[in-house]
Image: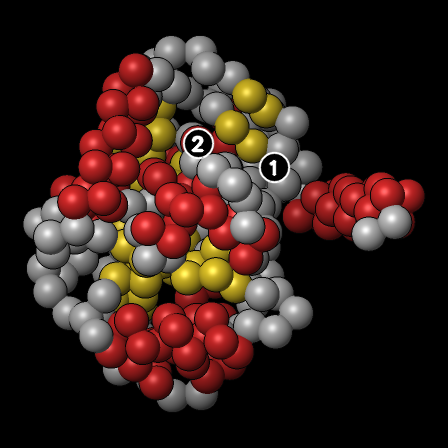
Amino acid sequence: MVEPFYQSIVLIAKGAFAGLGLKVDVVGEENIPLSGGVLLAINHTSYMDFALGGIPAHNRGRRLVRFMAKDSIFKHKIAGPLMRGMKHIPVDRDAGSQAFRDAVADLKKGEIVGVFPEATMSRSLDIKDLKSGTIRMARIAKVPVLPMIIFGGHRVLSYGVKDLTRGRPVVIMVGESLDISGDPEEAHDRLREALRDLLAKAIERYPDKPVGASWIPARFGGGAPTLEEAEVIEVEARAERAAKREAKGD
């Protein structure tokens, strides 16, 4: 795929990662087909996930990923033109039907589409409940769904974290094509379990995981909040954001 603008952004991102000394370990990129539509279902813990999530596909025949992202990013004076130039897909969370149609159209055209089924970043670093839509998109477009885990970017840039320490490890794992046949709710559950299992494998492979480390999920002996604790934090954070918007008169 010849897209000079997007390809140049990829090279800049890879250069930035090299500058940070990120040790990116990619496993399973061979599961990504060299052609044809593919839906990547990716966990979400870091502001870097959009850039990191494109690495396996680019390694695999320089393929590019169209990420579904909240529409507010597209309205940003700097990020907006970049997102549009790379033909990513804006998602209005109050009316997501257009984004759904756009994603299906891209998949039918043979594109790789990247979706974050958790919608927002996971404060627990574990797999939250997934939003519906991923399985339906793949079924309508008749493309495979590949689960993907990115683990490590949250140590660099995430909620309350901005740490440019060199040499942080990042593990990216691409799973095999998911069985999306049968009952849609059962397929949805299989996707969440596939992500949970792949996360366990990524953490097993991750080289830096002392007991109690804040960057490791609680169910693996880490100090991150549990899923339940993280939900309480998220509710409080949403209320605080809403109060700030109200105070500004938005």
Placement of 25 over or under 65, stated as above or below: above
Q: Is residue 167 visible?
A: yes
User: In the image, what residue occupies the spot 59% across and 24% down?
Assistant: 161
Q: Secondary structure at mark 1?
A: helix
- Label 1 to label 2: alpha-carbon separation: 18 Å
Q: Secondary structure at mark 2?
A: helix
Placement of 121 over or under 26, stated as above or below: below
The part of the image, by quadrant, that contains residue 9 is top left
Amino acid type of disc 1?
A: Ala
Camera-side residue: 92 or 116?
92
Placement of 38 over or under 42, stated as above or below: below
The N terminus appears in which quarter of the rendering? bottom left
Amino acid type of disc 2?
A: Gly
Q: Is residue 180 visible?
A: no
User: Seen in the image, is 31 located left or right of residue 246?
Assistant: left
User: In the image, what residue occupies the spot 31% across and 51% down?
Assistant: 86
The part of the image, by quadrant, that contains residue 213 is top right
- Name the residue beneath numbered marker 1: 218
User: In the image, what residue occupies the spot 41% across and 46% down?
Assistant: 81
Q: Which mark is residue 153?
A: 2
The part of the image, by quadrant, that contains residue 89 is bottom left
For the residues labelled 1 and 2, say whether their Cβ atoms are less than 8 Å apart: no
Residue extending furthest top?
Answer: 165
Task: Pinpoint residue 62: horizontal percent, then vertical percent.
Answer: 12, 47
Camera-side residue: 59 or 93?
93
